[in-house]
Image: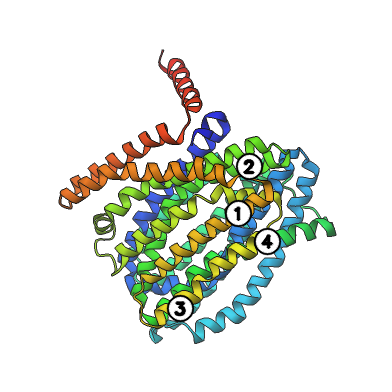
Amino acid sequence: MNILSNNTRLVKNTIMLFSRQILLMLVSLYTLRVVLKTLGAEDYGIYNVTAGIITLLGFLTGSMAIASQRFFAFELGQGNYEKLKKNFNITLTIYVIISLIVLVLGETIGLWFVYNKLFIPDERMDVVLWIYQLSIISFIFSLFACPFTSLIIAHEELSIYTYVAIIEAILKLIFVFILRFITFDKLLFYSILMLILVIIRTILYGTICIIKYKECSFSLYWDKELFKEIAIYSGWSIFGASVNVFKIQFINIILNQLFNPVIVAARSISTQIEIAVSSFSQNLSTALRPQIIKNYAVDNREKMFFLLSYGSKGTFLLLYLFALPLFLEMPIILNIWLINPPEYTVLFSRLVLVDALISSISYPLITAVQATGKIRVYHTIVSGILLLNIPVSGIILYYGAPPFFVFIISICFTSIASIARLIILKNLIDYSIKIFIMKVLFPIIFISILSAILPLLFWYFFTESIIRLMIIIFISFIMTCFNSYFIAIDANERIKINNKFITFFKKKYI
């Protein structure tokens, strides 16, 4: 986390991303409660399973965005604006091709799957087909937002995200408010509202980038070699990003086949919690990503290694800051939030937090691999490990294991994949595994144990209540911040942070 003290822009970007995430998280938590209450657990499960068929293809948006960011940030690091403009136009061409492929796959294989493989009550099939078509349109609009958001991140002007998030949050609250008073099918109307939200968001990002960035201009341009380079990189990024989405959605389908929609709803809620909490640590990773790539572009390995070590600690500890009190007080939090959460939601939510904590350590390491452009071996090995979640989970559930076993399996494979990432990075850029263990792994393990002692004592000796919840949140926050400051940050960095704080205080108040 001390890396923030060395770069004003990084501080600003992280603060803006945190503000954005807090806003979106609060709105999402409230709207999910209203939507679950309004639609009911079964309809909410149906929506997630149906829309999830297109979400299987939705990994394209994230992977293409990361691929675009790599090429845009690399050229910005080298100051090559002419090639940046070429990259932008070639990237748009690739997005058009991908959207056409998605449309064809969605209206053939995907539609067949909805008709023949999903367990949907007969009386809801007509609505499900409408939801499916709306999901396809929503995905295509999301896909075309990617080059614009990639430019924003590459330019490190992430405050734009906050402004768009404010508009998005207001619209989402309005839409959910309207949903409560609709007399016809609420599930269908909810799907229409979510599509409108995606369309507005895409238009906003596109308009801002066209006005703000000169390289964001549409022109007929073709470069076979550049297209090949970006397409190959994007292809491997798509393969890597697809693994996590396929894991989530295929296991949802397996749970739907072997159990019922309520179990799927419980898993979907736990996934929403994981996404909301993980986003706080991913904000730091997002702010770090362009700087890691730019330092690699100019061969500044010392600064890059510094960003990797402190970034890995920072992403984990930022997540742990929220995960610790959530893990301990999950039952009362879910009861306050959802009133009557579906069965297994508490256990599912606790397990996904453990999985997310292990994954968070690798966020900056993944960016470093992407910066090199040599991602074929990385995705072949790491994605292959993570893909094993699907067959192993299917086999264990088929032979009678309870549904929470899918999370235990995921934690095991996430840990193995994290080790594989570190070994690959060692071979690519000679990043020291020993230094990582000493400067990253040992400190965060020590901080995690030390910070959990006092909250665990309160959790064990006091009965469940709102007061205990507030005390544990407060103590967890204080202990994690205190231990992070004195253990995760070295003496020289603490001096720099103290000096900057004193300087800021004097300018502000003296």
* Front position in the image: 334 or 474: 474
Among numbered discs 4 and 1, the one appearing first in the sequence = 4
| Residue 160: percent from left, percent from top | 56, 42
- Depth check, mark 4 against mark 1: the one in front is 1
Dot 1 amino acid type: Ile
Element carrying mark 4: helix
Among numbered discs 1 and 3, the one appearing first in the sequence = 3
Q: Which residue is mark 2?
A: 292
Outermost top residue: 510
- C-alpha separation, residue under disc 1 versus residue under disc 3: 29 Å
Dot 3 amino acid type: Gly
Coloration mode? rainbow
Q: Which residue is mark 1?
A: 423
Q: Is residue 134 found left or right of 186 in the rendered image? A: right
Contact? badges 4 and 2 (CB < 8 Å): no
On screen, residue 137 above or below 204:
below
- Depth check, mark 3 against mark 4: the one in front is 4
Q: Is residue 13 found left or right of 65 in the rendered image? A: left
Dot 4 amino acid type: Val
- Depth check, mark 1 against mark 3: the one in front is 1
